[in-house]
Amino acid sequence: MLSALCKACAVVLLSGNCAFAQSDLIEPKAGTWKTWVITSGEDFRVPPPPDTSTAELERLRDIIAKNDAQVAAKITFWDAGSPGYRWIDLVNDRLLEGRQIPNAHRVYTYLTMAMYDATIAAWDAKYFYNRPRPSEADATLATALPPPRSPSYPSEHAAAAGAAATVLSYFFPEETSSFKAMAEEAAQSRVLAGVQFPSDSSAGLELGRRVAEQVIARAKADGSDAAWAGTVPTGPCMWVGNKPANVTMPNWKPIVLAAPDEFRPPAPPDCQSPAVKAEMDAIRQFERKFPNSYKAFYWQSPSGLFTDWYDYASKWMFEDKTDTNPPRAARAYAMLATVYYDAYIASNDGKYAYWYLRPHMLDPSITPLFAVPAHPSYPSNHSTLSTARCEVLAYLFPSHAEFIRKVGKEAGDSRVWAGIHYEMDNKAGAALGKAVAEKFIERARKDGAD
């Protein structure tokens, strides 16, 4: 009599010469998960694959027979993390190198949405066609990597690479040829590893590009290219300046929020009120020491603003093996980026609804720790964004929820330590970020992945 385990393993999905244990398959239903931009994975299903013929297997044998140390290094490089990992890291590295990326949050958002949607479309086709991996079709084929526990066609790495390179080429058109070459190398690495056929690779690249074009069309219509023709209001308690940053963001198109003002914070108190005077006293009396000043500078750096949030996600995916589950990994990156995008719009909606002055504008004796961002004070962008991201990460990685919420609180508090925000900015931002995150989490609970 078969054991319970053997019985479970006896349930198989058969296709051609391959057999996948049903219990071992990677997300067989992911092709039906809700997408961000494209209508559905099914609507972008690639044409049927060619037969797993002797000719393509022989071609694959010829390709991998020529592998050398340089090829092995490329295989290892692109196999690190999920299919999207290296592309996220590319944007991270640019920011850490000090290279300017205007509206970097848009780059992350459209990059991750494209990779996710391309992955979902690839998964739809994988389980529709159920093409065996090369080594499933011919067990004598030597592979440089363990074959993933999913059908072969189309290539998931190629789909993510085609999507990523196309979106990045939209944002950095002068580097189009470089991104295209990177995408082709990423796709080819899976062929060189013997885990996918050449036709899997070419189909994946084309799929990723098709999806990316839809994402780029969305980016072109998000309102971010609008020019501001307004004037800075004047009067008591009003922000002072002549070039307000992010002033058009309240009119950008959100991704999940019904409107930028859906969770707008209540109006801040009069700046001459006892409540604000008490907050000003707290700022004046705050004793700056190395630890809190260091943290304030850190949270103002590219690491604190952007990269470390993705690094947390990547690290935890490495630890729990989500990096071997491309749909779930792509979902995590996309949720992290998109919640930031909508939270940023919502926060600036609040800022430009009230145009509230910064602490040093109310009391010139206050010396901020570093240059104050050129936009109104209430609510705090950083508190909004950090809370939104930490709540999404707590949902995705519940075992790290307590830790990441402490990280998010420190990020918000750091703006008060630096003297650039009132505590009420911090609190309003945290409440706003939590409200935005809850709407994204509500969407996630219905996207088919839970």
Image (cartoon, rainbow, N blue to C red):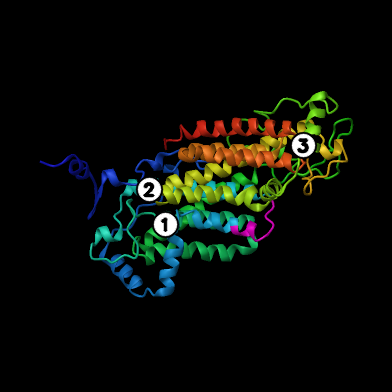
Q: Which residue is mark 1?
A: 203
Q: Which residue is mark 2?
A: 125
Q: Is residue 68 above or below residue 331?
A: below
Q: Residues within 10 Å of mark 3 (few under 14, many from 20)?
A: many
Q: Which residue is mark 3?
A: 377
Q: Nearer the viewer, residue 124 or 373?
A: 373
Residue stretch in magenta: 93-102
> Residue 254 placed where, x, y %?
63, 37
Q: Nearer the viewer, residue 387 or 259?
A: 387
**Where, quadrant-wise, is the C terminus in this rendering?**
top left
Residue at x-position 55% and y-position 41%: 404
Alpha carbons under labels 1 and 2: distance apart = 10 Å
Q: Residues within 10 Å of mark 1 (few under 14, many from 20)?
A: many
Q: Nearer the viewer, residue 450 or 371?
A: 371
Callout 1: SS: helix
Q: Nearer the viewer, residue 126 or 320?
A: 320
